[in-house]
Amino acid sequence: MGEQMVQIVNRAFVELILERFKHCLFGDRFSVIQRDKNRHFIYKHSLNRSQIRDTLCQLKVEDYWQSEPSKVVIDGIVHKFFMQATLTNFAGETRKTTLHVKFELIKLSEIEKTALIESGKLNSDEEDVDRTAVISFHEAEQPAEYAFH
């Protein structure tokens, strides 16, 4: 935990982060933090859990902006992205917008792993298992920046 930025200049590392993130999404091991910005955005676009997952799965290496130490999880890293998405609001209007996505991969505890194995949601041979907290999932409030453009 600290205030300095984590320097990530390697595309392969970002690919690995996205692979782990998408593994969490497809394994239904993700939650969107209930911040006002996130709730408003999800409500405005009438998004259900499946649509949120499908949108987040569109993240790609080129969308990566930066990573920084977590303010919550010891030794955790928060990854930030800006992505383009075409969404429809509750009035039926469709438009392309830039989304700010920020997430943190969190190791599952042994208790969480056991519960998932017992419920059939996780294979017992998976060793390196995460869940993810999506901290930001809303329209960008600042100009998009990218590490690899």
Image (spheres, helix red, strand yellow):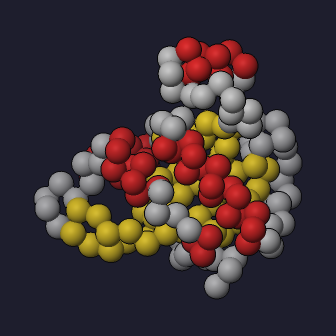
Residue 115, compared with residue 12, is above or below; it is above
**View extreme (left): residue:** 91
Asked whether 100 or 112 is in front, the reply is 112
- Residue at 59% across, 20% down: 117
- Residue at 21% across, 69% down: 94
- Residue at 54% across, 76% down: 143
Whether residue 145 can be seen here: yes
- The x and y percentages for residue 145 are 61, 76
- The x and y percentages for residue 72 are 73, 37
Left-right relation of 147 to 46 = right
Q: Which quadrant is home to the N terminus?
A: top right
- Residue at 68% across, 56% down: 17
**Count of numbered circles on the image:** 0
**View extreme (bottom): residue:** 149
Residue 21, compared with residue 7, is above or below; it is above
- The x and y percentages for residue 133 are 58, 40
Residue 7, compared with residue 127, is above or below; it is below
- The x and y percentages for residue 8 are 80, 67
Left-right relation of 38 to 7 = left
Left-right relation of 88 to 103 = left
Q: Which quadrant is home to the C terminus?
A: bottom right
Left-right relation of 6 to 51 = right
Whether residue 135 can be seen here: no
